[in-house]
Image (spheres, helix red, strand yellow):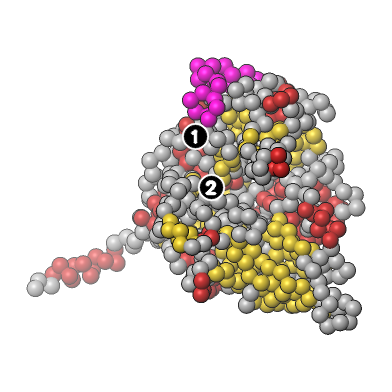
Amino acid sequence: MNPLPTAVAALLLPLLPADPPARSVFVLGIDGMDPVILQRLMDAGQMPHFTALAAEGTLQPLGTVNPPQSPVAWSSFVTGRDPGGHGVFDFIHRDPHTYEPLSSSRLPPEDDSPAYIKLGGWYLPLGGDEPQNTRGGTPFWDLLHDAGVGVQVYRMPGNFPVTPSEALTLSGMGTVDLRGEFGKFTWYVDDAFAYADLRSRKLKADLVKVDVEDTDGDGTGDTAVTILRGPPDFMHLPPGQIPGADQYLSVPVRLSLDPEDEAVWIRAGDAECVLKEGEWSPWLQVSFDAAPMGLMPLSGIVRFYAKSLRPRLELYASPVNIDPSAPASPIATPDDAAEELCEAIGFYWTQGFPEEINALKDGLFDDDDYVRQVGLVHAEAEVMLGEALRRFGPGQCTFFYLSDIDLQCHMLWRHADPRTPGAPAHPGFDAAVSPRHAGHVDDFYRNADRLLGQVRAALPSDALLLAISDHGFQAQTRQFHLNAWLRDEGYLVLKDGLREGLLLQHPQRDWDPAQHDGQPAPLVYDVDWSRTRAYGLGFNALYLNLAGREGQGVVDPADADALMAEISGKLEAWRDPQGGRAAVRRVYRARDVYHGERLAEAPDLVVGYDAGYGCSDDSTLGTVTAAVVEDNIHGFTGNHLMDPEVVPGILLVNRKLSASGHDLMDVTATLLAQFGVRPADGMVGTPFLND
């Protein structure tokens, strides 16, 4: 062997350039952070970590997508494509054949009649297609992983059902509870009058009446036995049948009230806890048996809240979350990722909307209850963030999602406008309550600043750090009933002279089963589709009743352009009788703003509401109301489901940028460019860092 080449190499090695340092990128996704609110608090010295990072690098508005809805925006960030490419256009899509609403996150199985064996009263499934994620395109994390980059993605909105991947991903917004719903909590009450009143309202809860019995003979009720419902009893249900109230799997719940300590001992299945009034339980693990002898246990986790114990019992049970230690449905990739995270940090919320907005909307929680529960959610997120930082290392890319801002702006804006201090009181302002909660949105911003400080302290100095939001926020003081407007303008026609009604099929209202041999009421439409040319379904979507596409379409495709121009012009010209303001800033044609292979699935028009306005919940879900516009006094009193120009997000990066005007898809392109990874076909963003 000739030693000369080895000797020469030894002499030259110190002179050769070293390998470039491994790139590392950490992205903090803060849903709903608004640039105007952020700058106000920075100017007041209340956001020291944002201020320091902005001085070190760059802070500027970040363009959102159209419409600026969280699942739409984050899907564009994930894929680097606009909705025409990834196929998520709204929270709510529709079946064009039946006009029925569909979740934007899940495609139903192609085969909706799975095979099964009926054995006695059991329906034994033989397999079949599972629901698929609506989102198309290639997630950035797959491109990075395939290039050898270690990737972690925590609580990504719109990633349920989880898409197959070798990268570490945990699903977020859009993830269902163990019942397969988007957050069905349970409300236990012992007062018969209160129960009757609650039954008459359209609650988003599983309402349960309990009887507190005096078991020790001291004259005071002390014990109640009830149940906690879990997933549908699918092995006793014919495939496709909607379960009735008694067709869910359940676990027994026993409540023992202590008359002296004002406490309740809760036993749910094999788990138990003791709560005083106003206290929250830790996570309790409960198991639902889908098959005999425990052959198919479905594990969930639940938290209880003792709202009131005496004289009225009011007990809350959270939606039964998918148990991350033994997921009944995949919520993460790879297969064991959720379990490993649970082992590291304990149980955690897996439901996509962990903040309990429904109980607040229903009036079962007051603002104090809500803020207390939000604190639990955020404390848990902080623990998860700590674990993400512990796992972060050179050559890796991590995305971590924070819900600290978005839902709280939706629910608490009515107390005080954090974007325009001194603005006129919101219609939902309550002089007896609002002053106590006026500063909460600012508190949540300050909490995000504190978490940013933890991230900065944990990252190596050469890591690229970005903080981004998918959109900003505005007040919504008025709600616009789009379908009522379409009715008044003659584009939507109801049957039999009705002024109010439903776009969707529903049981015939005047049907008397006694006069029809006990037969249930047939399903009917209130809409006369033979004379209806347009309808709204979703927060920003407007569809033509197009012949050949909609189930009962009547609009000739040759007339579609003229009809869209007519509707758009009238909507943009319409003025609110109260104050003369425009409700709609701009109406967009899908073909003008979207690009890609999913364009045909888009609504025909996208309604961009002006600041202060938004589509009503009624119209979003297919109800035609009497009024066209009215005060927005509850629910989402702050909003972003508007024209994208009035709700930009934020881009904060620890590098100096020479230009502005970037959007979410540019962030995606920048992540890929940092690791030298080529974008997938259809990605449209432009990197704003080239080093």
Quarter of the image where the N terminus is located: bottom left
On the question of residue 390 being in view, the answer is no
Tell me where residue 362 appears, x and y as whole percent. Answer: 76, 52
| Main SS class of the magenta portion in the image | helix
For residue 601, which numbered disc appears in the image?
1
Judged left or right of residue 336, residue 352 is right
Q: Residue at x 62, y 38 (%)?
A: 523
> Mark 1 falls on what kind of element?
helix
Q: Is residue 552 magenta?
A: yes
Q: Amino acid at mark 2?
A: Ser
Going from N to C along the chain, the mark reached first, 2 or 1, is 2
Judged left or right of residue 77, residue 364 is right
Q: Residue at x 75, y 28 (%)?
A: 499
Cα–Cα gap, marks 2 and 1: 14 Å
Residues rendered magenta in the picture: 547-571
Q: How many marks?
A: 2
Tell me where residue 429 appears, x and y as whole percent. Answer: 85, 46
Q: Quadrant of residue 137?
A: top left
Q: Is residue 216 above or below residue 574?
A: below
Judged left or right of residue 652, residue 578 is right
Q: Residue at x 26, y 66 (%)?
A: 13
On the question of residue 319 being in view, the answer is yes
Q: Is residue 396 above or below residue 607?
A: below
Q: Amino acid at mark 1?
A: Glu
Viewer-nearest residue: 273 or 571: 273
Judged left or right of residue 230, residue 496 is right
Extreme residue in the left direction = 1
Q: Residue at x 51, y 43 (%)?
A: 76
Tell me where residue 291 appears, x and y as whole percent. Answer: 51, 68
> Mark 2 falls on what kind of element?
loop
Q: Which residue is mark 2?
A: 105
